[in-house]
Amino acid sequence: QVQLVESGGGLVQPGGSLRLSCAASGINFNIYHMGWYRQAPGKQRELVARISNTGSTNYADSVKGRFTISRDNAENTVYLQMNSLKPEDTAVYYCNADRWRGITQDDYWGQGTQVTVSS
């Protein structure tokens, strides 16, 4: 059974920092691309950051220079370090694991963790 368990969300003031973690089990973590997505109330889910199975990263323009995604293959965990947080970063953050097997995509999601940026 595949599980992605996020942690680290919470309430933080503007300008503050949070570190999200996503612990994966039930998959061969090393071969999966890992990503963080977020969904704010009334908005569509959007990509925040993604790290490939080889360590390449990409970020949404809105978080470049403030957020950093990393992975620890020994711990089957992906992280999102969020600095200089803004109220518009408020959302539920979801962890994603995906890979392609030929024409088939394996795609898994965590349950989400709430991040609220407010004074």
Image: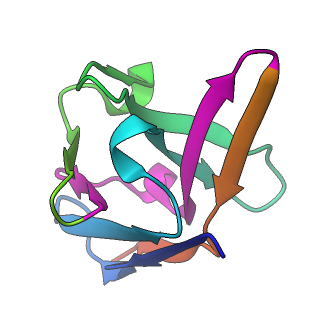
Left-right relation of 45 to 21: right
Left-right relation of 117 to 42: left
Tell me what residue is drawn at x 46 percent, y 74 percent. Answer: 116
Q: Nearer the viewer, residue 4 or 88?
A: 4
Residue 58: image location, x then y, percent:
36, 20
Tell me what residue is drawn at x 68 percent, y 25 percent. Answer: 101
Q: Nearer the viewer, residue 67 or 11?
A: 67
Look at the magenta stretch and give its main secondary structure: strand
Residue 36: image location, x then y, percent:
47, 47
Q: In the image, which residues are magenta?
A: 76-103
Left-right relation of 22 to 99: left
Q: Nearer the viewer, residue 24 or 87?
A: 24
Tell me what residue is drawn at x 80 percent, y 43 percent. Answer: 44
Q: Residue 31 lies in magenta, yes or no?
A: no
Q: Which corner quadrant holds the C terminus?
A: bottom left
Rendered view: 48 above or below 36: above
Residue 98: image location, x then y, percent:
60, 39
Tell me what residue is drawn at x 47 percent, y 42 percent. Answer: 35
Q: Which corner quadrant holds the N terminus?
A: bottom right
Residue 71: image location, x then y, percent:
22, 48
Q: Residue 92 lies in magenta, yes or no?
A: yes
